[in-house]
Amino acid sequence: MAEIYLAGGCFWGLEEYFSRISGVSATSVGYANGQVETTNYQLLKETDHAETVQVIYDEKAVSLREILLYYFRVIDPLSVNQQGNDRGRQYRTGIYYQDEADLPAIYTVVQEQERMMGRKIAVEVEKLRHYILAEDYHQDYLKKNPSGYCHIDVTDAEKPLIDVANYEKPSQEVLKESLTEESYRVTQEAATEAPFTNAYDQTFEEGIYVDITTSEPLFFCQG
């Protein structure tokens, strides 16, 4: 088993979300990487700890990369000290590791996110200095209180994970050969097609629609 510690706003929803992911064997919530070694919920503003979820997972069933992709699915990586309606340093985003062997996977995913966003993200990456288990009433909060407050959609855990690294863009030479002239100009040169002329303009068939260049899934149409 391996573990990683993730801060992403209110830990009630984030714990419930990760508990639903196949390959995750256990979760807990606590307070990580503050200015002192001890704290509690009432002292967070003073001790500067982040509400954090401990994720214990089976590396044979789910990789650290996949765990991080699930994580980025439900956080706003550009938001500083705020997720959803929750504001304050305790709601900052962070990836806290114990094993330095995890760093290559962490930095790879972070850099991919920054390339997609076009700017540096606000997620801090730090070695776990300490983790104080939160009070009992915070543990599995949404399992005990199904209608309780949650700032994310925990059912996102059940949606297929799309890893952009699996959908490599072909070279320009290959695209010129495989696409029509119009498709090439629209997808590679920011050209605009005439209104209502696209082959899919009146297509409403149920199924997964994919990127014409990489085959990356774009959306699901339910007929």
Image (cartoon, helix red, strand yellow):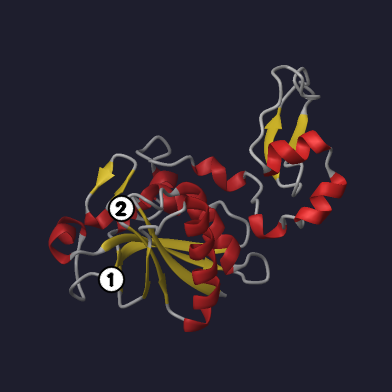
Name the residue tied to disc 1.
33
Residue kind at label 1, given as amino acid type: Asn
Place residue 196 in its image quadrant: top right
**Measuring 63% from the left and 57% from the top, which residue is drawn there?**
22
Q: Which residue is drawn at 56% across and 51% down?
A: 20
Asked whether 200 or 71 is in front, the reply is: 200
**Residue 157 or 87: which is nearer the viewer?**
87
Report which residue position mark 2 lands on: 137
Of the numbered discs in the image, which one, if any, rests on residue 13?
Answer: none
Given residues 207 and 14, the one toward you in this image is: 207
Task: Provide the secondary structure element on which disc 2 rests.
Answer: helix
Residue 102 at x, y percent in the picture: 52, 77
Report the label total. 2
Residue 18 in sight in this render:
no
Give the quadrant of the C terminus: top right
- Location of residue 187 in the rendering, given as x and y in whole percent from the top left corner: 70, 40
